[in-house]
Image (cartoon, rainbow, N blue to C red):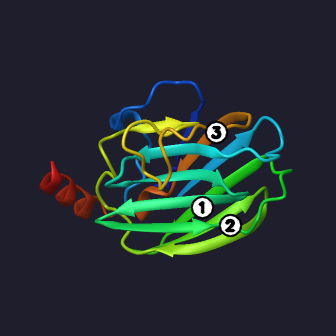
Amino acid sequence: MTATPTVDQRVLYPGTARLPVAASPDLRGRSYRVEAELGAPLDGAEGVLVACGDAQAGFTLFVRDAALVHLYRHGGRSTTTTSEPLTGEETVLAAEVTYLGGDARVDLRAGDLVIGGGSIEHLARARVSYAGLDVGRDRGMPVGDYDAPFPFTGSLRRIVIRNGLAEDVDAAGSLSVELATG
């Protein structure tokens, strides 16, 4: 019998306290999509949409200088993917990270349009951080190259995070890394 693929989806709202890592979506070694649904067009707003982790490891999705930015930190490396200029009319912004067996592809989207792309070397197989997850700001030691908390100045309705199929995960490899790192 073939295992049924599963997708874990979390819906998160601004204004909540930082989620501890145990309650945050498990994005290690798998594809994921982070989608920000805005309550009004972007129209010059900027700031953190979602941030998970800290200055050592994690990811953040934010708007700065009229562009959508996905920044990923792991193993001493920082990878930044920046979109083309936004129009200001966007109401759904997303980052799709596709796991490629070690590395990953990043596509930035405004609605259904791909507005930027790049790659990440060595997608983490263990938890990205123990610092937790914030919506609409980045508390503590920021994941991104901005001054914390860099709150989002627009209208953010919610963040939807979907992580990839269960068979994307190397369970034995993830467990050995997790046990080795505590």
- Residue 139 lies in quadrant: top left
User: What residue type is disc 2 on?
Assistant: Ser
2 vs 1, front mark: 2
Which circle's residue, 2 or 3, is located before the other in the chain? 2
Compared with residue 148, is residue 97 higher up or lower down, i.e. above or below? Answer: below
Q: Residues within 10 Å of mark 2 (few under 14, many from 20)?
A: many
Q: Is residue 30 visible?
A: no
Residue 176 x/y as whole percent: 17, 59
Q: Residues within 10 Å of mark 3 (few under 14, many from 20)?
A: many
Which circle's residue, 3 or 1, is located before the other in the chain? 1
Q: Is residue 52 visible?
A: yes
3 vs 1, front mark: 3
User: What residue type is disc 1 on?
Assistant: Glu
Looking at the image, which is closer to me, 9 or 158? 158
Furthest-front residue in this view: 147
Residue 96 has which mark? 1
Q: Are marks 2 and 1 in contact (CB under 8 Å)?
A: no
State the SS at label 3.
Answer: loop
State the SS at label 1.
Answer: strand
CA separation, marks 3 and 1? Answer: 20 Å
Residue 122 x/y as whole percent: 36, 72
Looking at the image, which is closer to me, 137 or 12? 137
Q: Which residue is denoted by mark 2 in the rendering?
A: 83
In this picture, residue 108 sits left or right of residue 181: right
Compared with residue 52, is residue 85 higher up or lower down, i.e. above or below? Answer: below
CA separation, marks 2 and 1? Answer: 13 Å
Q: Are marks 3 and 1 in contact (CB under 8 Å)?
A: no
- Label count reads 3
